[in-house]
Image (cartoon, rainbow, N blue to C red):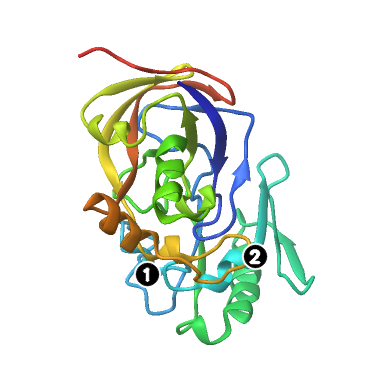
């Protein structure tokens, strides 16, 4: 098996950033993955004592499909986050500073319009991951599983609907669903698969158009009897993960 695509998503709910290589540490997510998030004004999120809360408390594709049309890029070396809207307007600011986060929150709130609730707050908390899981994980999807779903529904399903970090080839379709509890060497890092990825309505959103033009959750239930596609794994031993690197399922 090998890695075909590698992504991180610096802002929760916004676009993927393609990577060539990245290092991971034990117990962590990919660096800068889900490092920033826009919390809705009515979200019960306390930045002084952060704990995981449901994604609908934040700007997310499950509730805010227009977010798919925003193109975002974060440059860790400069600390600049750039977000561009489809009408050509954009903002480039520093999310690691309080003033920068205020300006980013204001810009995103204006873009969301009626989707914004109360006074949203843009967050970055060093070491905290605004992921969909309660603990930091790396998400992986078998490209053969996506291809199998596409064959069954008779239509393409863009891989980025599923917002994984690692997309890999070389395994039988859906075989990864049986890896829970197993360990993998992913490039130079050792990961332990902790759960299947249960899909949600965010997958309805076409990442190219921002339209809800398919229902993968329903399709998965119809063809497989469940809504699972992909897996989540925790990093046991850190190391480098890169495009083209091998993935090995370790023996029990």
Frontmost residue, 240 versus 3: 3
Whole-percent x, y for residue 237 in the image: 37, 20
Question: Dot 2, crowdedness within 10 Å: few (<14), some or many (≥20)?
Answer: many
Q: Looking at the rendering, which quadrant does residue 140 occupy?
A: top left
Q: Looking at the rendering, which quadrant does residue 85 occupy?
A: bottom right
Residue at position x 54%, y 19% from top?
Answer: 245
Residue ID for mark 2: 70
- In three-dimensional space, the C-alpha distance between marks 2 and 1, rounded to whole angstroms, equals 18 Å
Question: Dot 1, crowdedness within 10 Å: few (<14), some or many (≥20)?
Answer: some
Whole-percent x, y for residue 12 in the image: 49, 57
Left or right: 6 with respect to 52?
right
Frontmost residue, 72 versus 145: 145
Q: Kindly state the secondary structure of the residue where label 1 is placed.
A: helix
Q: Earlier in the sequence, mark 2 or mark 1?
A: 1
Relative to 79, say whether 142 is above or below. above
Q: Looking at the rendering, which quadrant does residue 235 occupy?
A: top left
Relative to 136, say whether 37 is above or below. below
Image quarter where the C terminus lies is: top left
Residue ID for mark 1: 56
Whole-percent x, y for residue 244 in the image: 58, 22
**So how many labels did they put on this image?**
2
Image quarter where the N terminus lies is: top left
Residue at position x 25%, y 29% from top?
Answer: 179
Residue most extreme to the right: 88
Residue at position x 65%, y 65% from top?
Answer: 70
């Amino acid at each position: 098996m090998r890695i075909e695509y590698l992504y991180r998503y610096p802002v929760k709910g916004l676009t993927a950033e393609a990577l060539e290589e990245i290092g991971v540490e034990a117990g962590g997510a990919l660096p800068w993955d889900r490092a920033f998030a826009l919390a809705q004004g009515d979200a019960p999120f306390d930045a002084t004592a952060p704990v995981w809360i449901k994604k609908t408390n934040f700007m997310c594709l499950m509730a805010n499909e227009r977010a798919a049309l925003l193109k975002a890029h974060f440059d860790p070396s400069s600390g600049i986050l750039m977000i561009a809207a489809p009408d050509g307007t954009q903002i480039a600011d520093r999310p690691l500073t309080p003033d920068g986060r205020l300006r980013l929150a204001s810009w995103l709130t204006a873009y969301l319009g009626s989707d914004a609730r109360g006074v949203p707050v843009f967050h970055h908390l060093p070491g905290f991951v605004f992921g969909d899981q309660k603990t930091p994980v790396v998400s992986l999807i078998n490209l053969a599983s996506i291809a199998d779903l596409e064959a069954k529904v008779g239509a393409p399903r863009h891989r980025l609907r599923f917002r994984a970090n690692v997309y890999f080839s070389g395994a039988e379709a859906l075989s990864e669903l049986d890896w829970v509890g197993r360990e993998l060497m992913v490039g130079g890092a050792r990961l332990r698969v902790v759960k299947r990825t249960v899909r949600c309505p965010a997958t309805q959103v076409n990442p190219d158009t921002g339209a809800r033009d398919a229902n993968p959750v329903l399709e998965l239930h119809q063809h497989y009897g469940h809504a699972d596609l992909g897996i989540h794994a925790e990093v046991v031993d850190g190391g480098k993960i890169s495009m083209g690197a091998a993935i090995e399922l370790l023996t029990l």
